[in-house]
Image (tube, rainbow, N blue to C red):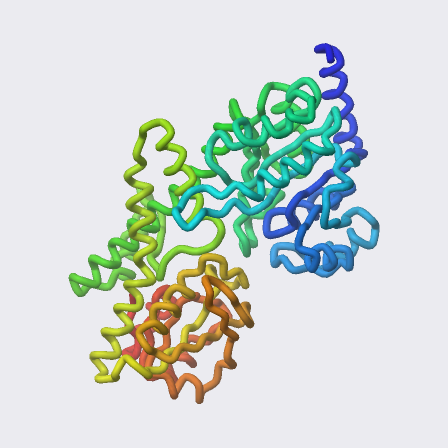
Amino acid sequence: MSVTQAEDLLKTLKDRIATRQAVVGVVGLGYVGLPFAVEKAKVGFRVLGVEQNPRRAEKVNRGENYIPDVRDKELRELVARGLIQADTDFHRVPEMDVIVIAVPTPLTQNLTPDLQYVVRVTEAIAERLRPGQLISLESTTYPGTTEEVMLPILERSGLKVERDFFLVHSPERVDPGNKRYTTKNTTKVVGGCGPRSLEVGAFFYSQTIEKVVTVSSAKAAELVKVFENTFRAVNIALVNELALLCDRMGLNVWEVLDAAFTKPFGIMPFYPGPGVGGHCIPIDPHYLEWKAKEYNFNTHFIALAGEINRKMPEFVVDKALRLLAEAGIPVRGAKALVLGVAYKKDLGDYRESPAIRVIQGLRRLGLEVRYHDPYVPRFSEHGLTMESVELSEELLREQDLVLITTDHSSYDYPWILEHAPRVLDTRGATRHLKHPKVTLL
C-alpha cells in the first residue's frame, strides 16, 4: 500500500469520526469501558461492546446499569435508540472503525505483570483486523506493552501499522465515584505508534473529551499512567509509615496530618489507612518496578512503598489485638464487626480491599468476625466468602470490637459510637468526634 493510500485511509477514518458514522468498539464494559461507551453514544456514535461476562452483556442489552458512574436513565435511553449493544465475542470486529480495549491487567502471585487478557483480546482482533481501523489500549500496563506485545500480534494479520491500521495507547483515568471528574472532563493523554496513529487517536478522543494531550510515543503514554499511580502509592506509603511511627511515639497521626495540610503550598493531602485496594494502586507500580529490571534498574521507592502498604492490614490486626488485651478480652472467640469491605468509600468495589485482609488476619487468630457494608451484600475474594449482616444496636452491643475499615458516608458514626463497646477507626472517620471509645489508627 502506498503512502497516498495510507493517507487516504487516515482521511476516511477521520471523516467517519467527524460525521459520527464511525462505529466504536469497546472491549471490556467495566468501570472504564461502560462509562466510555456511554459518553461516545451520547454524542451520536454507535457503540458495539464486547463483554465476555455474559451476565454483564445481557444487562447492557436490557439497559440495566451496574456501574455507579453511569446514569441509569442515560444507559436505558441509549440502548433503546440502538446506540449501545453488547456481545460476548469478537465476530463484529470488522464492523468497528475504532476499537478501545479496557480489560484487566492484574499481577501474578509473584507480583509480575499478567497480560493474558490484553494478549487474548489482541489475538482475537488480529484474526479479524481490516485496513483503516484504529486500536487504542486503555488498560494500565508497563511501558512498551502496546509496541512490544500488541503490535507484533496485530501485524501477524499481514497488515502494517501506520500503513494499514493505526495503534495508540491512551491510559484510562477513571476515579470510580468521583462526581467532579468524569470521563468527559478528565484530560486524556494519547501516544501513538507513529504520527498517523497519533493524529487519528487524538482526533477521536477530542470528539467527546474536553482536553487531549499528546505525547511522543505509546511507551511515553504508558509511563504517564504508571507514574500517576506510583505517585499516589508512594505518598500513601509515606503517611502509612508516619502512622506506624506515631503509634510507637504515642502521637495522633491524624492531628499531625490535619495540621500539616493547613500549609497552603509545598504539600499535598494524603491519609493513612488499613492498606490500599482497587485495581490501580496495589498493582500498577509493580508493573513499572518489573519493567525497570529489564534496564538493570531498581526502583527502590516503589518497592519500599509496596512493602509498607502491604503491611498495613497486619498492623491493623496487631492494633486490634492490643485493644482486646487492654480490655482483658481473650482473643480466641472474641467478636469483631468490620464496617466496610469496599476498598473505597461509597462504592461497591472490593477488589484487593485491605479490609478483607484484615478479616482474614483476625479469623486466623480465632476471632468471630462479621462485616457490614451497605454497598457489598456479599463478597468472594482470596478464598474467603462472606455475606453482610444487618447493622443494629444489638449487633453493635454484642461485639468486643468494631473496626471501621471503609468510611462510607452513609454510616451514622455518633450512633455507632453510642452502641459499640470500643471502636478501632482505621480511616479517621470519627477523629473529629473525639470519643473515648475510639482508638484511631
Which residue shows up at 29% across the image and 40% down it?
A: 301
Which residue is at a point 79% across and 55% down the rendered structure image?
77
Taking the image as shown, residue 101 lies to the left or right of residue 108, namely right
Location of residue 204 (image quadrant): top right
Pick out the residue farthest to the left: 249
Residue 117 seen in render: yes
Task: Say which residue appears at 66% left-offset and 44% top-offset.
Answer: 27
**Which quadrant of the rendered structure holds the N terminus?**
top right
Q: Is residue 346 above or below residue 159?
A: below
User: x, y (%) of residue 225?
Assistant: 48, 38
Q: Position of residue 281 (x, y in %)?
A: 43, 49
User: Which of these two is toward me, 153 or 248?
Assistant: 153
- Quadrant of residue 371 within the rendered picture: bottom left
* 312 is higher (above) or lower (below) than 432: above
- Residue drawn at point x = 38 percent, y = 42 percent: 231
Residue farthest along the right direction in this orientation: 81
Pinpoint residue 275: horizontal percent, then vertical percent.
Answer: 36, 58
Q: What is the total number of numbered labels drawn onto the structure image?
A: 0
> From the viewer's perspective, is residue 130 above or below residue 80?
above
Q: Quadrant of the C terminus?
A: bottom left
Q: Nearer the viewer, residue 216 or 329?
A: 329
Q: Decide which of 205, 353 is in the foreground and name it.
A: 353
**In front here: 21 or 135?**
135
Residue 14 appearing in the image: no
Relative vertical location of residue 394 with respect to residue 235 in this rendering, above or below? below
Q: Position of residue 23 (x, y in %)?
A: 77, 37
